[in-house]
Amino acid sequence: MSQPFRRAAGGRIDRSRTLTFHFEGRAYEAHPGDTLSSALLANGVRVVARGPYTGRPRGTYGIGAEEPNAFVQVDSGPGEPMVRATQLEVYDGLVARSLAGKGSLGEEPDDSRYDKTWAHCDVLVVGAGPAGLAAAHAAGVTGARVILADERPEPGGDLLGGRAHLDGRPAMDWVTDLRARLAGLPEVRVLPRTTVTGAYDGNFLVAVQRRTEHLGPAAPAHVARQRLWHIRAGQVVLATGAHERPILFPDNDRPGVMLAAAAAGYAWRYGVLPGRRAVVAGAHDGALWAAVDLVDAGVELAAVLDARHLAGGQAHRALRDRGVVVAAGHGVVGTDADADGVLTAAWVAPVDGDGQARRIACDLLATSGGWNPAVHLYSQAGGRPRWSDDHAAFVPGDPLPAVACVGAAAGTFDLADALAEGAEAGWQAAAATHGGGGEEPLPPATDSVASAGAPAACWITARADSPPETIFVDLQRDATLRDVRRAVGAGMRASEHVKRFTTAGTAADQGRTTGVTTVGVLAGLLGLPVGAVGTTTYRPPYAPISFALLAGRDRGRLLDPERRTPMHERHEADGAVFENVGQWKRPWYYPAPGEDLDQAVLRECRAAREGVAMMDVSTLGKIDLRGPDVGEFLDRVYTNRFSTLRVGQCRYGVMCRADGMVFDDGVTARLAPDRYHMTTTTGNAAAVLDWLDEWLQTEWPDLRVSATSVTDQWAAVAVVGPGSREVLRRLAPSLDVSAEAFPFLTVRDATVAGIPARVFRISFTGELSYEINVPAWYGLALWDAVAEAGRPAGITPYGTETMHVLRAEKGFIVAGQDTDGTVTPHDAGLGWAVSTVKPFIGGRSLARPDTARNDRKRLVGLLPADPSVVLAEGAQLVVDADAPTPVPMLGHVTSSYRSAALGRSFALALVAGGLTHRGETLQAVDGGQAHPVVVTEPVFYDAEGARRDG
Amino acid sequence: MADLLAQRRSPLAHLAGELAATGFMRELPYLSSYEVRADPAEPAMARLGAALFAGPLLAAAWPTAGRAVGTGPRYALWCGPGWYLVVDEPGTTLESAMAGLPAVDVSAARTVLELTGPFARDVLAHGCAIDLHPRAFGPGSCAQTHLAKAQVILHQTATATYRVFVRASYADYLARWLLDAAVEYVRRIDE
Amino acid sequence: MLSVPCPWCGPRDETEFRYGGQAHVAYPADPAACSDAEWAGYLFMRDNPKGWFAERWFHSAGCRRWFNAVRHTVTYEFAAVYAPFTQPPGVPS
Ligand SMILES: [Zn+2]
């Protein structure tokens, strides 16, 4: 028979449609609105998972986010491990299987879309149960911007399928009515299937919205499967409800043992009988009302136990009317199971003394030790829960600014009180942020319920001789009372320590059902009040978030911005291999057919040294500096002087941080008396601009200087090599390119290939070279024109690898590669660029005893004894690699290449004592191998600088 | 001159088709723009205001924090205290009006993505942390902020029209990001 | 995610800012006149109080202005923001 445990009517399911799903390889039927848990119960499937360490069978235990047992692996769709069956909406074609503790990621990449968005609101209401709905409505009618987030598919909370009445009508009528009203408020946004997972500083909350998972294969591919919401809220109303907690007893983990309100919820919300013959065991009125719900749904009540010694109250009367007598002062002390491990009977005994236990056959044992307010977000926001004897629970402690807790989350379990509290909080929150307005809506009227008495803090019912290893305090971790006793025996007193020792509360459910119970058990063992032990700290996320969602659309090509120069597509067409330099994509080398990196670089280097070559240097940082005091400012910022620079001239400059360490370097030109053009290294452009702004704003506001980034304004092509002058002459016929008219370290405005350009005669290779700058949108045209003009001379495009070889041959450092924040200009061999007469940032530090030491690491050259060995950058330098450990380390390799011009390998390095080691042989150790290297001057090519004029 | 202009290539020329296909995004290439840094109380700034914007009101009123002035195609956007971005039609030269002021031609440094229509705000909200609700940000508002992982200047020119100024080197990334964020909304237009 | 109240742009996410450490640590007028100890004090020594702290922030992705703020290092609450070279307004006790 299909769905033998399905009730004949009722529930928030669509019985007009039947879905088919597979669990553990078998096909079953369900209805839209079912969760996997409700559908399995309807089909009489009791075993859903297994204990991760014990392997014991486990069944559905709860009905929502609190579920500790029923985690399954979903194999349909993109597949997902560790999904709560209690929250997994069944769709046609769902395929799932049981788990024992952990799942596995699918083999195939998940190509679903994942999305993020930002949202702002005056009032964020978390939870759409009665209190949350009342709060959202009261806030919304003022015109305030409201977001109402709820993890369930539809609002209503515990009213869903419940039997409460509001304003004399079924409560769901009120819910439906309120939904319609909220839908009519344009500034109210209701987010179903949305779990608020974290509360952070400044009322910044993060929520996970499950948008299409419930549609299964019918989910449209263009709609993001999940969305991560970043919500900045003026006020937050936490109406997160409460989690039901069990009473522990021996063999409390068998399929068939469930939380009582959850069991009743299956009967009424999903129209499913969670069992046919039940024992209900509780310690508060709620358990009794769950028994009423179960018997009214058609479940035979074999026994109703209350650990309290109470009689009277409305719930007792309701049960008596149904022929059920509550066994006061009784609890469960054990269970029996069949061969599959599924519950067959409960053993029942008085909770006091050691009275005779009685066996009662049942297929459902519904337990409820009370309700734990869901204080997680309150706690994450900085609140400290406090123990309340009246509630027998931890409730929110001191109020937080701009955060209100209402309803069950605040320990207000009475429906009328919760509705009033919610409405008031929503109203106040709107008034505090939006200014309020209109008339405060009255919450609906409820039937009053007389209570039997206060809930009891009842944690365990067991006999003195019950084996503690059968009493599970954390079902998902298979942690037992024995583990807690061991922790106490080992001297632990704090719940945080016991949590880590026993792992209780550390699983995916974060101890939602039994975290407080564990604290209660611990308090009992220690003989302390529960409040003195205290809860563990609640940290985000409240529920697991998939990495795919955290990545959102920031994956693949969009993982990080790829900055492109205007010539990018030409480099692609020319077959360039790219490398990442910061966020920039730069051509690394341009292999000819059949060439590898080494061959291509040797060819590119030869072209630059012997013929003519070209490079895209658009990525260089560029800063436009204006104002009458730029010269003075640059004198303070650079180690050398720039105020004396004549218009049309350029100069190489070094910048230090205040500690005297090299920060950046580059060439800066004076374009007009009050105007300079600064260049920075590619990776440091933003940092240098920040640096300039910092000094101008926070130290020297009297200097009239403005700094504007023009990195992206200018595209630039370097034309390099002995043949470069001829290429430029062809491109700029009206420009006198002779060495006399256009000397080294000068800049000229010119028309190049018909494009207005600024041409710098500078060199990062030692060769004659020009850097032609044009407005970026002409960059591609300029590149093509240079290539065309250079074609007769065989102009060769080159990439960053060749650039590095060429500059390293000349001993030119790269700030950030040959320096690392511990290197002074003198260490880097740049003492010639350090003024001894003018002050500059970092200057004072160069006279500190530490920076003036002679044995500091300084830049040297290295020639490997074996000229075919290219040393690893970062390789350590030692005198004797076989010396006893620790081997004294002298320094390390910073740049290392193979040189076409030298016909051998070479390197730059930082070595303690620097050139005092000149001529000595050191060992460069890399991967356990020591390579002999000879220390040299750090200039390997054209030391006299004869080549830069061509 | 025509030859010269023909040599230009905008940062998003290669994505023009894909942007057009969304029905609500396009590149506004080659806009003239200048970064001007001066105290609006300076006489030179008053003169520049007068030269840029007809009428005594506009001439006097450089935009306050978070605001832009102008009705198009010429706008002045507040970027920071004493820092403005003057924007105009492609090819407009404003050097002479700006003489004597620290004004830097940055026309080629950025390009502009324009988003128009009922979904523009939602698409931006996928990557922008600032509040774009009409109560917080409306026509005439502008802000320097992050959109996805790019730094941008956001300028709302009309009720449902936003301009995103993005550095040329980031334009390809940002446009592809926006195209991806727009997928759901493009389908909604189709339906 | 802190919401940092830029005095010019209003509240913005922390990711738009750079943190600048303790405020009111002036660059010595004449570094050459500092003793080694004084100079090291300027370079390396900063307060690290539990409680209210005057510190510098830079709105790098927005208006690019440096400003000072009084912030509580336990609750992260901002009590005030104010311009460089001015003294902090009254600090909550
Ligand atoms: Zn700002």
Image (cartoon, coloured by chain):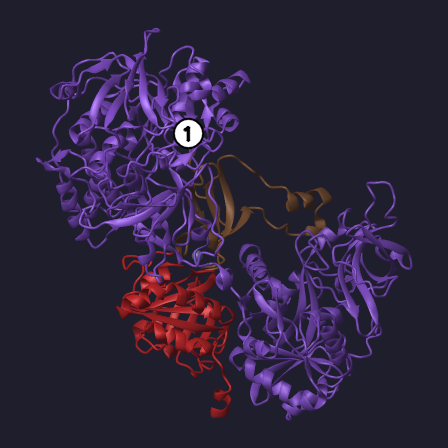
Chain colours: A purple, B red, C brown
Give residue A275's position: percent from left, percent from top: 26, 30
Which of the 4 image quarters holds residue A587?
Answer: bottom right
Say which residue appears at 74% left-offset and 86% top-offset. Answer: A723
- As drawn, the residue found furthest toward the left would be A168
Give residue A492's position: percent from left, percent from top: 52, 20
Which of the 4 image quarters holds residue A707?
Answer: bottom right
Q: Quadrant of ligand 1?
A: bottom left
Examine the rendered structure and indicate whether residue A532 appears above or below residue C16: above
Examine the rendered structure and indicate whether residue A567 appears above or below residue A917: below
Examine the rendered structure and indicate whether residue A595 appears above or below residue A29: below
Q: Chain of mark 1?
A: A
Q: Nearer the viewer, residue A328 or A752?
A: A328
- Residue A251 at least partly seen: yes
Position of the N terminus of chain A, as image quadrant, is top left
Q: Is mark 1 within 8 Å of ligand 1?
A: no
According to the picture, the residue beneath numbered tag 1 turns out to be A475
